[in-house]
Image (cartoon, rainbow, N blue to C red):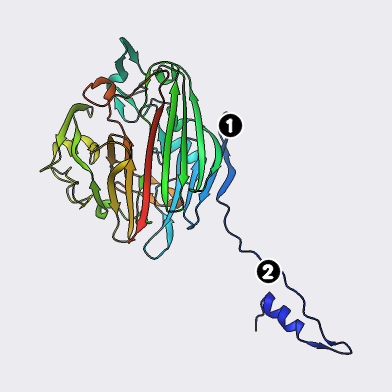
Amino acid sequence: MRLDRRTLLTGLAATPLAGCGTMPRVAVPSIPFMRTPPIGQKDWGTLADGQTVTMFTLTNDRGSQARIMTWGGILQSLMVPDRAGRMAEVVLGLDTLADYVERSRNFGSTVGRYAGRIANGRFQLDGREVQLDVGTGPHSTHGGPVGFAKRNWLGRADLTEEGPGVVLSLVSADGDQGFPGRLTISVTYRLTHDDRLTIDYLALTDRATVLNPTNHSYFNLSGDPERLILDHELQIEADAFAAYAPDKIVTGELAPVAGTPFDFREANPIGRNLFEANEQLRIGGGYDHSFAVRGQGLRKAGRLSDGFSGRVLEVWTTEPALHVYTANPVEMIGRGGVAYHPHCGVALETQHYQNSPNRPQFPSTALRPGETFRSRTEYRFTAS
């Protein structure tokens, strides 16, 4: 018979010893329950220039967990429960820092200064033309060749009553990737005790510029990235979407979703209309479009659910648009050696419209000295 420590001590306490009578009982100190610290912090690798990359692990009272690293401001992992309380990974990712540096598809990245495309990398701002670095492509994409997703941010732990968090900060110099103004920006991730992952952006500039940051996580609520998201049901609080010209630059038109594959006003499986012969789907290679979210302020933009696991994700934002990207061309080996295939995840990016600096009919993305940029996104998780 195998005895544990408590059984052994109890038995010894009651055993008579020769010549000594009964051994006095010994007070056994209680062993406190060991819970995971709300914020963990460790080095996660070194960049080629010698900079250390730090990984922060946030754990809330329910045991849900988020891992955020300073390189790229990346949400590297997010574990939340299914309907049976089982924890599993719900964002796509990679195993090592080298993987993220060398072959990431913006998994979990903080994208900026400008998410999406700016046509030909040019726009007018306060009477002067700005030319951005477009790298090898015709347009500026996701902030340029060395945007925020390829920088090592400063990070510090930030524990509040709401839950554990981390504050990432970065200074982007005047002229960085062609953008004017010295921009100081912070991004605060927090995993609240009611299973919300909140992301707060705050930025200041010393010269007029444009700014449109977002988070580029790919979600798969099943907990198994080998299960495609085609059966995930998506609902979006939008009556219109930003239509593309053939070169995948938005035309400036907010086209009605009614009668099109873009009608997610009621929940529909993502795969129901994804493969229709539709010009906009052809241009995007699938869903890769911004939806015009109804209302102002912090409000619900959409809802994603997975019948297999019971997990539900609501997206709330202060931003005017929700960009939906169904990982159309993704074909690579991901975290844990799992093969990622097209439609293995869906990005739900809260942001302004692409090419807004060249489309005055869209809400402005200009930020000027004396102004403060603030934006909030919440990914709210439940299970049913």
Q: Label 1 neighbourhood size at 10 Å, few (<14), some (14-19), many (20+)?
A: few
Left or right side of 252 for 118: right
Q: Is residue 39 something that shows in the picture?
A: yes
Left or right side of 87 for 311: left
Q: Is residue 96 above or below residue 127?
A: below
Q: In which quarter of the image is residue 310?
A: bottom left
Please report the residue visible at 30 percent of the width from the left and 57 percent of the height from the top: 306
Q: Residue 281 in the image: x percent, y percent?
A: 18, 39
Q: In which quarter of the image is residue 349?
A: top left
Q: Residue 165 in the image: x percent, y percent?
A: 50, 43
Q: Considering only order in the chain, which callout, 2 or 1, is on the residue closer to the N terminus?
A: 2
Rendered-image quadrant of the N terminus:
bottom right
As measured in the structure, the alpha-carbon distance from the residue carrying label 1 to the one carrying label 2 is 44 Å
Q: In this view, does 123 lie above or below 168?
A: above
Q: Label 2 neighbourhood size at 10 Å, few (<14), some (14-19), many (20+)?
A: few
Amino acid type at mark 1? Gln
Per the image, the residue denoted by label 1 is 51
User: Which one is in front, 193 or 139?
Assistant: 193
- SS assignment at label 2: loop
Q: In this view, does 186 lie above or below 88?
A: above
Q: Is residue 245 something that shows in the picture?
A: no
Please report the residue visible at 26 percent of the width from the left and 26 percent of the height from the top: 363
Q: Is residue 184 above or below residue 332?
A: above
Please report the residue visible at 37 percent of the width from the left and 49 percent of the height from the top: 380
Per the image, the residue denoted by label 2 is 30
